[in-house]
Image: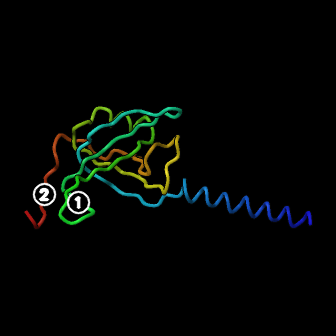
Amino acid sequence: MNKYVKIGILVLVVVLSAVVYWRYFFVFSEGVKAGNLNYFEKKGFAFKTWEGRLVQEGFQSPTAGALQSNEFRFSAQGDDVAQKLERASGRFVELRYKEYLHPVPWRGASEYVVIEVLDVSDAKKESEGTPFN
Protein backbone atom coordinates (compact mmCIF):
# COMPACT_ATOMS: atom_id res chain seq x y z
CA MET A 1 0.00 0.00 0.00
CA ASN A 2 2.84 2.39 0.83
CA LYS A 3 4.29 1.89 -2.67
CA TYR A 4 0.99 2.93 -4.32
CA VAL A 5 0.70 6.05 -2.16
CA LYS A 6 4.21 7.17 -3.19
CA ILE A 7 3.41 6.59 -6.88
CA GLY A 8 0.11 8.44 -6.52
CA ILE A 9 1.79 11.43 -4.86
CA LEU A 10 4.46 11.49 -7.57
CA VAL A 11 1.83 11.42 -10.33
CA LEU A 12 -0.15 14.16 -8.58
CA VAL A 13 2.95 16.39 -8.27
CA VAL A 14 3.81 15.88 -11.96
CA VAL A 15 0.25 16.64 -13.09
CA LEU A 16 -0.02 19.76 -10.88
CA SER A 17 3.37 20.98 -12.11
CA ALA A 18 2.25 20.55 -15.72
CA VAL A 19 -1.00 22.43 -15.07
CA VAL A 20 0.80 25.34 -13.36
CA TYR A 21 3.32 25.51 -16.20
CA TRP A 22 0.54 25.46 -18.83
CA ARG A 23 -1.56 28.16 -17.15
CA TYR A 24 1.17 30.60 -16.12
CA PHE A 25 4.44 30.01 -18.02
CA PHE A 26 3.51 28.53 -21.42
CA VAL A 27 3.90 31.14 -24.20
CA PHE A 28 0.64 30.97 -26.13
CA SER A 29 1.66 33.41 -28.88
CA GLU A 30 4.33 35.93 -29.88
CA GLY A 31 4.04 38.90 -32.17
CA VAL A 32 4.47 42.59 -32.90
CA LYS A 33 1.94 45.38 -32.29
CA ALA A 34 2.25 49.00 -33.33
CA GLY A 35 0.36 52.13 -32.35
CA ASN A 36 0.45 55.25 -30.22
CA LEU A 37 1.54 54.74 -26.62
CA ASN A 38 -1.31 56.14 -24.51
CA TYR A 39 0.24 55.66 -21.08
CA PHE A 40 3.02 53.77 -19.34
CA GLU A 41 3.28 53.56 -15.56
CA LYS A 42 4.73 51.55 -12.69
CA LYS A 43 2.08 50.28 -10.31
CA GLY A 44 1.14 47.49 -7.93
CA PHE A 45 0.84 46.67 -4.24
CA ALA A 46 3.33 43.91 -3.47
CA PHE A 47 4.99 43.69 -6.90
CA LYS A 48 5.60 46.98 -8.75
CA THR A 49 5.31 46.25 -12.46
CA TRP A 50 5.32 48.42 -15.58
CA GLU A 51 1.91 48.59 -17.26
CA GLY A 52 0.94 50.39 -20.44
CA ARG A 53 -1.68 50.85 -23.13
CA LEU A 54 -1.14 51.10 -26.87
CA VAL A 55 -3.90 52.60 -29.03
CA GLN A 56 -3.92 51.18 -32.55
CA GLU A 57 -5.43 52.72 -35.65
CA GLY A 58 -8.83 51.62 -36.85
CA PHE A 59 -11.86 50.35 -35.06
CA GLN A 60 -13.23 46.95 -34.21
CA SER A 61 -16.50 45.93 -32.69
CA PRO A 62 -17.73 42.75 -31.06
CA THR A 63 -21.28 43.68 -32.14
CA ALA A 64 -22.47 45.01 -35.47
CA GLY A 65 -23.09 48.74 -35.61
CA ALA A 66 -20.97 49.66 -32.57
CA LEU A 67 -17.49 51.18 -32.59
CA GLN A 68 -14.72 50.39 -30.17
CA SER A 69 -11.11 51.57 -30.32
CA ASN A 70 -8.28 49.04 -30.62
CA GLU A 71 -6.44 49.05 -27.31
CA PHE A 72 -3.55 46.80 -26.42
CA ARG A 73 -2.93 46.65 -22.67
CA PHE A 74 0.42 45.17 -21.72
CA SER A 75 3.06 44.68 -19.06
CA ALA A 76 6.74 45.36 -19.73
CA GLN A 77 9.57 42.97 -18.96
CA GLY A 78 12.84 44.41 -17.71
CA ASP A 79 14.26 47.84 -16.96
CA ASP A 80 15.70 48.37 -20.46
CA VAL A 81 12.23 48.04 -22.05
CA ALA A 82 10.75 50.30 -19.35
CA GLN A 83 13.38 53.00 -19.89
CA LYS A 84 12.65 53.11 -23.64
CA LEU A 85 8.88 53.34 -23.09
CA GLU A 86 8.93 55.85 -20.22
CA ARG A 87 9.62 58.78 -22.51
CA ALA A 88 7.55 57.55 -25.47
CA SER A 89 4.06 58.50 -24.27
CA GLY A 90 1.98 59.83 -27.17
CA ARG A 91 4.48 58.59 -29.76
CA PHE A 92 4.20 55.81 -32.32
CA VAL A 93 5.91 52.62 -31.11
CA GLU A 94 6.40 49.06 -32.36
CA LEU A 95 6.52 46.42 -29.63
CA ARG A 96 7.43 42.73 -29.63
CA TYR A 97 5.38 40.78 -27.09
CA LYS A 98 4.62 37.33 -25.68
CA GLU A 99 1.13 36.25 -24.68
CA TYR A 100 0.64 33.96 -21.70
CA LEU A 101 -2.63 32.27 -20.77
CA HIS A 102 -2.79 33.92 -17.32
CA PRO A 103 -0.77 36.67 -15.60
CA VAL A 104 1.37 36.16 -12.51
CA PRO A 105 1.81 39.05 -10.04
CA TRP A 106 5.57 39.52 -10.45
CA ARG A 107 5.34 39.52 -14.28
CA GLY A 108 2.52 42.08 -14.50
CA ALA A 109 -1.25 42.48 -14.57
CA SER A 110 -1.67 41.55 -18.23
CA GLU A 111 -1.41 38.34 -20.23
CA TYR A 112 0.63 40.33 -22.79
CA VAL A 113 4.27 41.00 -21.84
CA VAL A 114 6.37 43.32 -24.00
CA ILE A 115 9.88 41.93 -24.33
CA GLU A 116 11.41 44.41 -26.81
CA VAL A 117 10.86 47.89 -28.22
CA LEU A 118 11.48 47.72 -31.97
CA ASP A 119 10.90 51.37 -32.92
CA VAL A 120 9.83 54.72 -31.44
CA SER A 121 8.94 57.58 -33.79
CA ASP A 122 6.95 60.81 -33.75
CA ALA A 123 4.36 59.77 -36.33
CA LYS A 124 3.11 56.66 -38.05
CA LYS A 125 5.50 55.62 -40.79
CA GLU A 126 4.07 55.75 -44.28
CA SER A 127 4.29 52.58 -46.35
CA GLU A 128 6.91 52.85 -49.03
CA GLY A 129 6.68 50.98 -52.29
CA THR A 130 3.43 49.16 -51.59
CA PRO A 131 1.16 48.50 -54.56
CA PHE A 132 -1.78 50.15 -52.77
CA ASN A 133 -0.32 53.71 -52.70
**Which type of secondary structure does the marked residue at label 1 adopt?**
strand
Find the residue positioned furthest to the left: 133
Q: Measured from the top left, where is residue 68 in percent x and y?
A: 23, 55
Compared across the picture, whether 104 is left or right of 90 comes to right
Q: Earlier in the sequence, mark 2 or mark 1?
A: 1
Q: CA distance from mark 2 to mark 1?
A: 26 Å
Image coords of residue 14 (percent x, y): 71, 61
Q: Residue furthest right?
A: 1
Amino acid carrying label 1: it is Gln
Using a 10 Å C-alpha cutoff, classify the residue at mark 1 as few (fewer than 14 neighbours), some (14 to 19) or many (20 or more). Answer: few
Reading the image, the residue beneath label 2 is 128
Which quarter of the rendered picture does the N terminus lie within?
Answer: bottom right
8 or 32, which lies in front? 8
User: Which three-letter amino acid code belongs to the residue tagged 2?
Assistant: Glu
Residue 125 image position (x, y, % from top left): 16, 50
Q: Position of residue 72 (x, y in %)?
A: 32, 50
Q: Is residue 102 rendered to the left or right of residue 59?
A: right
Residue indicated by mark 1: 60
